Image (cartoon, grey):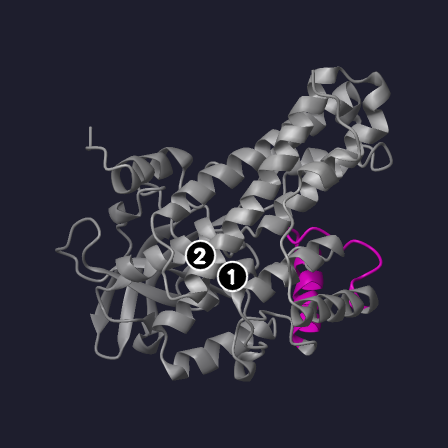
């Protein structure tokens, strides 16, 4: 029988040694957050009021050059490496700073622009992204192309220096209030599957664009449908070459699944909160809960070590490949399990949604959101197919 004690954390944790400059960097971040993180939580960014509050937070981050520390200084960054970004993320979650309303931009589109964008595109879009002037939504899925992006049917027909876009996107994260969306469009009408796709950026206030919010389980519009009716977009909004969209989208998906979008600090912080919840209630809990909590804490630490290794490989010149699917399945399952345990600890009291009852309301919100983890960023079923075929060498069924 496993008995969980507070000392357990120190006994089983593998320690990563940081350099003196990295520790100084951590202290700088911690000091800045202590002076700038809002004292009261912002409203949900899935409401109009909260969206604008979080936009202001993005502007505050940019004023301190913290919008995305890995970016070059001319785009609002600090030209730091991925290890330093992981340190930044650890301090970000430790400080309980607001969630990033522009996560689709800074964590997904930003790295994609760094790799495939022109200098003009970087200047135009990265600076506005860092400053919070452009908040981005993600335009991947369609009614008949969910996790199977190769089945996309929304079209972008070239007309001299513009594209004429028609079709529909759905489950577009942050689109209800966002300024722009990025996505794949079929620029070759005769093409099939992953060929003939282009990666295009579209302003959501453009004539012919209609955005219809989709309520989540909590009733807030975290997603939206986007309809395109002869929307004219300048060709300069295409990233990379015409027909190169699949390659670029796979790079973006790699950032989403394996490194940028879900840093390990997010899950380490949840694991720490889960430990506190357990200790606050351990007198009335069965011993089996201790084993489950310990296991989740260890999984969160293991994920962090794996991502530090992944970051080191990228810094050495490697690219994020199919192994990003392993990370995606891992963190989405872990997130749900941690929130399920929290619900088991809180028991029937969790249904009261009382902010003052072990912070039950935040656990409930996280629990409901955790059900989406195995779906977004490519369903876990699709990711398991990728793992079996590309990493394990198993044949297609």
Q: Residues within 10 Å of mark 1 (few under 14, many from 20)?
A: some
- Residue bearing the label numbered 2: 255
Counting from the top left corner in percent of width and height, residue 89 is at 64, 58
Tell me, yes or no, whether the two marked residues, 1 and 2, touch with CB atoms within 8 Å: yes
Counting from the top left corner in percent of width and height, residue 164 is at 28, 67
- Based on the picture, tell me whether residue 257 belongs to the magenta stretch: no
Q: Residues within 10 Å of mark 2 (few under 14, many from 20)?
A: many
Counting from the top left corner in percent of width and height, residue 63 is at 69, 77
Q: Is residue 207 above or below residue 139?
A: below
- Residue drawn at (53%, 69%) of the image: 81
Instruction: Write the start and end of the magenta stretch as one range.
Output: 36-62
- Residue bearing the label numbered 1: 107
The one nearer the camera, 368 or 388, is 388
- Residue drawn at (51%, 57%) of the image: 260
Horizontal side of 248 relative to 340 (left or right) equals left
**At numbered mark 1, what does the secondary structure look like: helix, strand or loop?**
helix
**At numbered mark 2, what does the secondary structure look like: helix, strand or loop?**
helix
The one nearer the camera, 303 or 150, is 303
- Residue drawn at (75%, 15%) of the image: 286
Q: CA distance from mark 1 to mark 2?
A: 7 Å
Horizontal side of 164 relative to 325 (left or right) equals left
The one nearer the camera, 324 or 35, is 324
Quadrant for the N terminus, please: top right
């Amino acid at each position: 029988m496993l008995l969980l004690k507070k000392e357990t954390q120190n006994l089983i944790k593998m320690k990563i040694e940081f350099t003196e400059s990295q520790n100084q960097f951590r202290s700088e971040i911690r000091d800045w957050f202590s002076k700038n993180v809002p004292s009261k939580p912002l409203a949900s960014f899935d409401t109009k009021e909260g969206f604008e509050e979080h936009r202001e937070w993005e502007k505050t981050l940019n004023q301190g050059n913290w919008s995305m520390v890995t970016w070059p200084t001319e785009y609002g960054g600090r030209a730091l490496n991925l290890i330093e970004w992981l340190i930044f993320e650890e301090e970000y979650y430790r400080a309980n700073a607001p969630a990033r309303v522009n996560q689709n931009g800074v964590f997904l589109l930003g790295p994609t622009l760094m790799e495939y964008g022109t200098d003009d595109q970087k200047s135009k879009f990265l600076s506005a992204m860092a400053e919070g002037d452009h908040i981005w939504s993600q335009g991947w899925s369609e009614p008949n192309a969910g996790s199977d992006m190769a089945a996309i049917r929304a079209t972008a027909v070239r007309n001299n220096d513009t594209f004429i876009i028609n079709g529909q996107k759905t489950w577009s994260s942050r689109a209800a209030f966002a300024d722009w969306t990025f996505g794949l469009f079929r620029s070759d009408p005769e093409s099939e599957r992953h060929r003939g796709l282009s990666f295009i950026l579209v302003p959501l206030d453009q004539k012919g664009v209609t955005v219809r919010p989709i309520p989540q389980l909590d009733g807030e519009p975290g997603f939206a449908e986007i309809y395109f009716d002869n929307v004219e977009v300048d060709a300069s909004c295409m990233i990379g070459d015409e027909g190169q969209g699949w390659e670029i989208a796979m790079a973006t998906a790699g950032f989403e699944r394996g490194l940028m979008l879900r840093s390990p600090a997010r899950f380490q912080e949840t694991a720490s909160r889960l430990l506190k919840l357990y200790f606050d209630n351990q007198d009335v809990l069965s011993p089996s809960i201790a084993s489950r909590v310990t296991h989740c804490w260890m999984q969160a630490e293991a994920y962090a070590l794996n991502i530090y290794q992944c970051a080191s490989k990228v810094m050495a010149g490697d690219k994020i490949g199919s192994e990003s699917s392993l990370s995606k399945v891992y963190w989405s399952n872990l997130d749900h399990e941690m929130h399920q345990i929290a619900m088991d600890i809180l028991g029937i009291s969790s249904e009261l949604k009382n902010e003052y009852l072990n912070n039950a309301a935040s656990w409930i919100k996280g629990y409901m959101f955790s059900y989406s983890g195995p779906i977004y960023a490519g369903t876990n079923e699709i990711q398991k197919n990728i793992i079996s075929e590309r990493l394990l060498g198993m044949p297609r069924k």
